[in-house]
Amino acid sequence: MASIRIGNGYDIHRLVPERPLILGGITIEHTLGLLGHSDADVLTHAIMDAMLGALSLGDIGHYFPPTDPKWQGADSLNLLEQVDQLIQDKGWKISNIDSVIVAERPKLKPHIPAMRDRLAAVLNLQSDQVGVKATTNEKLDATGREEGIAAYAVVLLEQV
């Protein structure tokens, strides 16, 4: 069995009025927020899927189904802690995370340090183990038309 594993994750949610915009556990001032059963934090969801994928454990929908009222409005950072505990229970830990958020607006660069610090704190990592980048889709597709925000993540796990 290999002593390292890599997983990738992806998530996208629709932007709607009257919802908070939460990315990486940070609430960002914006006229629109992400629609979802939980808080719809696409960055945290992509990271969780990458963690689970690295160990062939399925995806977050398996553990936190949107059909279960228990997860309605859930704080994704709490879900992230549960996924982290699951991988630790299986004898693994996070080596590093790299991620990218795809959004036309708002500009995310000023919020990236806070996202990195928040995610690192929840996962008991150093901030330099958590990469967060942001880009636009140059007005192309649904994210480019500001209909939603997407996130991609890659997580490297190492056996403890």
Image (cartoon, grey):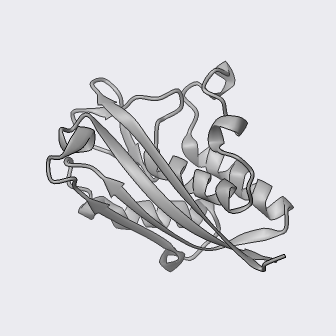
Residue at the image point whose x is 56% and y is 77% from the top = 126
- Above or below, 45 against 36 in this view is below
Q: Position of residue 15 (x, y in %)?
A: 30, 32
Q: Position of residue 66 (x, y in %)?
A: 60, 26
Check the picture and name the quadrant holding the C terminus.
bottom right
Q: Nearer the viewer, residue 63 or 117?
A: 63
In the rendered image, which quarter is residue 6 located in? bottom right
Residue at the image point whose x is 35% and y is 55% from the top = 101
Residue at the image point whose x is 78% and y is 69% from the top = 92
Q: Position of residue 34 (x, y in %)?
A: 37, 34
In the rendered image, which quarter is residue 85 located in? bottom right
Instruction: Answer left or right for 133 relative to 90.
Output: left
Q: Position of residue 14 (x, y in %)?
A: 34, 32
Residue at the image point whose x is 53% and y is 65% from the top = 154
- Above or below, 151 against 39 in this view is below
Check the picture and name the quadrant holding the N terminus.
bottom right
Q: How many marks?
A: 0
Instruction: Answer left or right for 88 relative to 111.
Output: right
- View extreme (left): residue: 139
In the rendered image, which quarter is residue 35 located in? top left
Instruction: Answer left or right for 39 relative to 149.
Output: right
Instruction: Answer left or right for 6 relative to 39.
Output: right
Q: Nearer the viewer, residue 2 or 116?
A: 2
